[in-house]
Image (cartoon, helix red, strand yellow):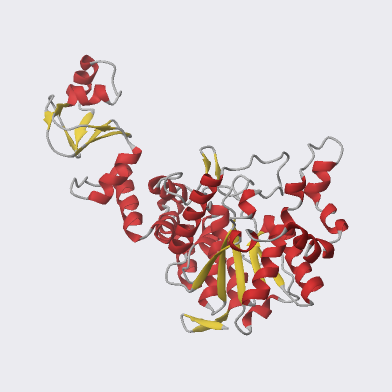
Amino acid sequence: MASTNEGVTVTLSEELTWRGFVNQTTFDDITALDGDSRKFYFGVDPSGHGMQIGNLATAMMLRHLMARGHQAYLLVGGATGMIGDPDGKLDERNLNAVEEIAGNKAEIERQYRQVFSGQLFEVVDNYDWFKNINYLSFLREVGKHVPMSMMLGREFIQARLGEGGNGISYAEFSYSLIQGYDFLHLYREHGVTLQVCGADQWGNSIAGVDMIRRIEGGEAHVLSAPLIINKATGRKFGKTEGGTIWLDPELTSVFKFYQFWLNVDDEGVIDYMKVYTLLSKNEVETIASEHAAAPERRSAQRRLAWEITKIVHGEDRARAAEQATRVLFGGEAFNPSDEGVVSILKTEIPVVGLNQFVTDILQAAEIVKSKGEARRLISGGAISINGLKIAEDINVEEVSLIKKGKNTFILVN
């Protein structure tokens, strides 16, 4: 399957290769994806509250598969989330409460519907097929066909069981069997022959391929997205001093999400654009040329922040985050009637009620320690309201943005 990119025919394998998505795969040749439509699946466990930007990199790869006619099954791991993937963990996970898992499942499904808006897909939950499975039947049907050598060969298993390791429970040891069975079930019930996953899920995904071969005599494949690395630090992309960057706006606000992308490093911004946006090759190359000529303008970062915030949070919230950034840091006038911007600012800066004098507002926001200090700032021209410096203490009766110095703000609302 091919698409036209500014008049040039581009195959799916060429698109994925150019964007840097081609990583480990069981295909002999990635061009196998250029053939007939396949059914594939991708899953996220509700052990956390939805996806973070590591998952998002893989999700963006799915967008390209969907756009070329491959059929997607997006899995919410209601069953696997009750155990938690032990891969990469030095210690046993704490089990999440059933109520927490239910909330996380709902958030993952919401994120699926936002990120894949306009695409055709089916959401499935592996709890639906695990809840009625008999333990003895599972051992006979599945466990009997899985060699211990395959499970014991996993690096994290050896690390947990080896000298100095912290051990592993039977539940976590069995996690790859559960995930492998997901692939087997989807193969049987829906004809799914491809699992798409993050680089850290390669071992678990291979377990499913092996089950399908051993139990059904069928052929299935895995395609993993690469681990995205911050070129400036050499660390996993998305891990910041402030913590993980989540898609859930309750965990990472829309404004902070936008700011994260706005502040990515010059060295990696174009690579991130290839992975995290749907911009064409010509568009990206044009932006790359502009960025190389004047990196100080950060035009590439601004476009990246806009595109990915639009995909994850919708155009209205992306516009509000962009406008709030201009108001706070770009010298643009504050419009009190812009509800989107006001809503953003409420989550990011101190908020003080209306009908108070500026000296009281500064004190309430803990910007100053006394009214005397507040009056000195006003007389010194350090305080502005909606971009206009004030020379005397006044009562603020309308929604306003007060600014002290260069980067200290208060929303009066």
Q: Decide: is 365 above or below 320.
A: above
Q: Quadrant of residue 353?
A: top left
Residue 179 percent across, percent down from the top left: 69, 60
Asked whether residue 88 appears in the rendered view, the answer is yes
Q: Is residue 214 left or right of residue 328?
A: right
Asked whether residue 293 appears in the rendered view, the answer is no
Q: Quadrant of residue 145?
A: bottom right
Q: Which quarter of the figure is the C terminus placed in? A: top left
Instruction: Report the label total.
Output: 0
**Nearest to the observer: residue 402 or residue 105:** 105
Give the residue displayed 64% in from the left and 55% down from the top: 227
Q: Decide: is 213 above or below 159.
A: below
Q: Decide: is 304 above or below 332.
A: below
Q: Which quarter of the figure is the N terminus placed in? A: bottom right
Residue 171 percent across, percent down from the top left: 73, 48
Give the residue displayed 20% in from the left and 22% down from the top: 360
Residue 323 percent across, percent down from the top left: 30, 51
Give the residue displayed 54% in from the left and 79% down from the top: 68
**Nearest to the observer: residue 266 or residue 294:** 266
Q: Is residue 329 left or right of residue 275?
A: left
Q: Decide: is 309 above or below 183.
A: above
**Nearest to the observer: residue 73 or residue 330:** 73
**Nearest to the observer: residue 332 or residue 194:** 194
Residue 130 percent across, percent down from the top left: 65, 60
Q: Is residue 154 left or right of residue 48?
A: right
